[in-house]
Amino acid sequence: MRSIHLFLLFILVSPLLSAQVKVEREYRIHWREVPADSRDWMRDAFEGIKKIRWYRDEQEDAFSYEAKLKWKGREYSVEFDADGRILDIEYKIDFEDIPVSARRNLEEYFNNEFRNFRLMKVQKQLTGDPDVLEDFMDEDEKDGITGRFEIEFYGERDDEKDLWEGLFDEKGEILLLRKMVLEPGLNLEF
Amino acid sequence: MKKIFIIITLSFFVLDSFTQKPVWKSGYAPELVLSIPLKKNLSFSSKTESFIYYFESGRGDDGSALWYEGTDIQVFINGKINPFQRWALGYQYGIEPGESDSHRAIQQYSLSYKPGLLTIGQRFRADQTFQENEPVRFRIRYRLGIELPLQGTSLDQGELYLTASDELLYAIQGNDRKTENRLNLQLGLYVSKSLRLQAGGDFRSHFTNEGTMHEMLVKSGIYLSF
């Protein structure tokens, strides 16, 4: 019985302990908590959209807003800064959707850098002026848009077998590479 | 694979309805799990779980009381094959009042992946239990588990999550055969990278030559990773 009391006490106290540490977290929010500029931009770009899931993404000393939605068969993620100004648009694509010349560069990169690899998720990332991005969404106008590819993949090299996230420019040249962590909870193993 | 798993699980309950009146037991099983990294891709972990019961019916002496049925202390060496696959070799020391202590060797292979929101984990385990004056008990086990963040698309510090699993077990001991199903549902709090807390329930069904027994266990767990 004493252990039950101790555990309940632990559950009550632990959020207080965690609140003292600055953390990075992303959590669901109501649309009313989102800056009006972000909501307006979404309404103009995705005309007629009814269901948008909003999230607040908190980093060490900043935060942003993220809208997730399905639009014309694609999954989109749109990120806004704390003032509600659009930062980027991301949507899932197939590797085969990437233009041939960029695809060739990407394949060359993976083959040169990794002895074995498997693509997990490919996303197109678009950045640019808010009006230009809006024109792209509703009129497919590509001028002024910077396109990149964000690719999550499993890769083996040297003595590393890891999950990676790579950011590539429109030509398929690597811009950024970072390791991703998939640590299943101990609860799933023991 | 999932369809087979569901059919086998459901068939246990159907078979149960044709057998004699089952035994029901209720109890509480707190557990403490800790994990310590040793070197790259290798870690040590331990799990201590106790069983305290407060209700039993179906054996003729129905009623409530509070009795202790033992503690299992497990230690493991774990290896990471790649981000998705792991192995573990373990030993369990079992203490049960009125019984001689038991010793168990454990071999485990687990898989995990994260298709979107869910983290899915599969665990394949074999174990052999040695106890004085008893034939060796051999078991094979398969568990399918999920973890779902409840406050966003990823699990971050201070957030709640839901974890559920179902495990099938098959045991051979001398001439005895036993199948068991363990359904588990728990609510968890991801306090920090090194601490998780969980509380929920475990519904266990044992099917033996002698009959059926169902156990409803209230579970709570503290998971520490250093």
Image (tube, rainbow, N blue to C red):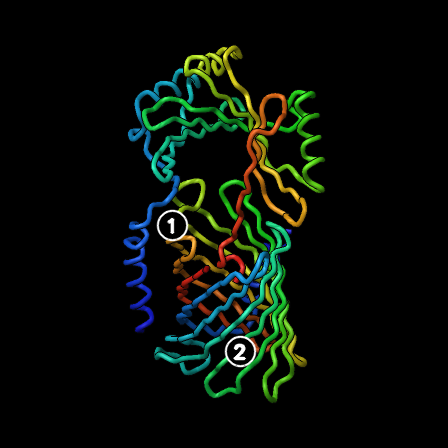
Q: First in sequence: mark 2 or mark 1?
A: 2
Q: Is any atom of residue B136 visible in this view?
A: yes
Q: Secondary structure at mark 1?
A: strand
Q: Which residue is mark 2?
A: B93
Crowding at dot 2, Cα within 10 Å, few <14 / some 14-19 / many 20+, comes out as some
Q: Is residue B11 visible?
A: no
Horizontal arrangement in the rendering, residue A34 relative to residue B79 (left or right):
left
Three-letter amino acid code at disc 2? Answer: Tyr
Q: Which residue is mark 1?
A: B160
Discs 2 and 1 share one subunit: yes
Residue A72, percent from left and from top: 52, 22
- Point 56% across, 53% down: residue: B121
> Is the residue A154 above or below the residue B171 in the image?
above
Q: Is residue A53 left or right of residue B124?
A: left
- The three-letter code of the residue at mark 1 reads Leu
Determine crowd level at label 1: few under 14, some 14-19, many 20+ residues with C-alpha closer than 10 A. Answer: many
The image shows residue A40, relative to residue A180, as above or below, that is: above
Residue B43 in picture, x, y percent from top left: 55, 62
Label 1 marks a residue whose chain is: B
Q: Secondary structure at mark 2?
A: strand
Q: Residue at x 36, y 45 (%)?
A: A23
Per the model, the C-alpha gap separating discs 2 and 1 is 32 Å
Protein chain holding label 2: B
